[in-house]
């Protein structure tokens, strides 16, 4: 299975690391070894640094009812989906990276047995500072998010990156892990 399913708490820097990885691969002269699946999200573009397809909740429901998604979930007040065509490169031998959700992980594993889990995290105090600096949620909502972190324990097979230092250091660790797992 050539699917890498990325999970991690808000504030861990998943988008920053994936964007850095994407930029590094875009600079390559050969075809990139990964395809980054675009998500469909019921969120405006100006609320995220992720390049996604923005739709409202009613259009998201229409997409679900028309079986447009290979994966879809609801988290933190938003609907997320990955269209079937975004996973199509796997059939051509290309590794596909999906920015997923911990809450949906077991369903993703059921639908795509053998997927690789990439868990990106950071220490609680780093997460708290990042979430506070975003200004999207009040302190209680942030503390509620952080308290849910205790419920997830990575599997020994998961790839794990702690994004607590510099972005370039974390990106180097991520690229090394991916290279070893995917043999690129």
Image: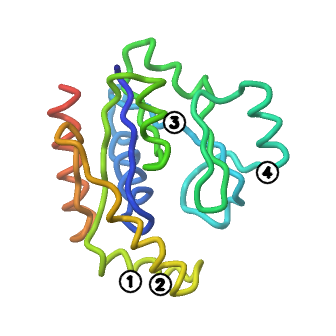
Identify the residue at horizontal 71%, vertical 27% (top origin). 68
Of marks 4 and 2, which one's residue comes earlier in the chain?
4
Q: Secondary structure at mark 1?
A: helix
* Residue 122 against residue 85 in the figure, above or below: below
Q: Which quadrant does the N terminus fall into? A: top left
Image coordinates for residue 159, horizontal then vertical, percent: 22, 43
Q: How far separated are the C-alphas under marks 4 and 2?
A: 26 Å
Q: Which residue is mark 3?
A: 37
Q: Residue 87: x and y, percent?
A: 52, 25
Label 4 vs 3, first from the N-terminus: 3
Secondary structure of the residue carrying tag 4 is helix
Mark 3, Cα crowd under 10 Å, few <14 / some 14-19 / many 20+, is some
Residue that label 1 marks: 129
How would you rate the neighbour count of disc 4 (Cα within 10 Å): few for under 14, some for 14-19, many for 20 or more? some
| Spatial separation of the CA atoms under disc 4 and disc 1 | 30 Å
According to the image, label 2 marks what residue? Answer: 132
- Image quarter where the C terminus lies is top left
Q: Secondary structure at mark 3?
A: loop
Looking at the image, the residue that sits furthest to the top is 92
Q: Is 131 or 73 nearer to us in this picture?
A: 73
Whether 84 is drawn above or below 23: the answer is: above
What color scheme is it? rainbow
Q: Position of residue 173 (x, y in %)?
A: 17, 52
Tag 3 and tag 1, C-beta contact below 8 Å:
no
Q: Name which residue lies at 45% across and 65% down.
A: 10
Q: Are circles 4 and 1 on residues that touch, CB within 8 Å? A: no
Circle 1 crowding by C-alpha within 10 Å: few under 14, some 14–19, many from 20? few
Q: Which residue is mark 4?
A: 57
């Amino acid at each position: 299975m050539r699917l890498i399913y990325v999970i991690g708490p808000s504030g861990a820097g998943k988008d920053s690391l994936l964007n850095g990885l994407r930029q590094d691969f875009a600079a390559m002269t050969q075809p990139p070894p990964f395809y980054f699946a675009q998500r469909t999200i019921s969120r405006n573009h100006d609320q995220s640094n992720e390049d996604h397809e923005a739709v409202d909740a009613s259009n998201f429901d229409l997409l679900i009812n028309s079986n447009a998604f290979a994966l879809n979930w609801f988290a933190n007040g938003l609907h997320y989906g990955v269209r079937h065509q975004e996973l199509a490169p796997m059939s051509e031998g290309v590794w596909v990276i999906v920015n997923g959700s911990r809450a949906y992980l077991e369903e993703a594993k059921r639908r795509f047995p053998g997927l690789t889990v990439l868990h990106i995290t950071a220490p609680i105090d780093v997460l708290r500072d990042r979430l506070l600096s975003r200004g999207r949620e009040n302190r209680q909502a942030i503390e509620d998010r952080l308290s849910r972190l205790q419920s997830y324990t990575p599997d020994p097979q998961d790839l794990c990156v702690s994004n607590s230092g510099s972005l370039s250091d974390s990106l180097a660790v991520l690229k090394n892990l991916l290279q070893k797992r995917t043999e690129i």
